[in-house]
Amino acid sequence: MQESHAHPGYVNVAKRLKRASGHLQNVIAMVESDRECIDIAQQLHAVERAVAAAKRALVHQHLDHCLDDALQGQPQAVRVAMADFKDITKYR
């Protein structure tokens, strides 16, 4: 079984997921009330973006904490390579 990795950054991830959940509930209500397709599509796009933002925040949280901890004591070149990797993931 995996060890629990509760981090303060998880609060931010949870906020983003709650926002996505709220968007999704709005989309469901829009579908049930027979709203225009373009309005529904726009809100679905907002749901997708909110979930993607939560996923990105979770990945960066992992990179910033879990992997940094694992790199303690590693040679400078390894730490620089990880820093470069973290930087480039922002452009995903």
Image: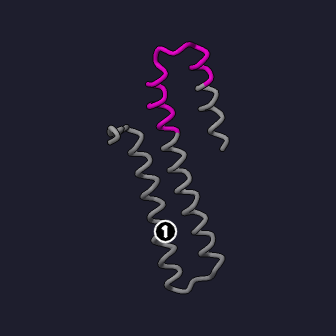
The magenta segment: 60-81
Please give the name of the residue rendered at 48% of the width and 44% of the height, measured from the top-left corner.
Answer: 58
Please give the name of the residue rendered at 58% of the width and 13% of the height, measured from the top-left corner.
Answer: 76
In percent of width and height, residue 37 lies at 64, 80
- Most foreground residue, 23 or 91: 91
**Which residue carries the number 1 mark?**
24
User: Considering the numbered disc 1 on the image, is that residue within a helix, a strand or a loop?
Assistant: helix
In percent of width and height, residue 66 lies at 44, 31
Please give the name of the residue rendered at 55% of the width and 86% of the height, measured from the top-left corner.
Answer: 34
Q: Is residue 36 magenta?
A: no
Query: Taking 81 as reference, is 1 above or below it?
Result: below
Please give the name of the residue rendered at 38% of the width and 45% of the height, measured from the top-left corner.
Answer: 11
| 32 horizontally vs 83: left or right | left
In percent of width and height, residue 19 lies at 46, 59
| 66 horizontally vs 39: left or right | left
Query: Taking 32 as reference, is 3 above or below it?
Result: above
Q: Amino acid at mark 1?
A: Leu
**Magenta stretch prevailing secondary structure:** helix
Query: Taking 52 as reference, is 73 above or below it?
Result: above
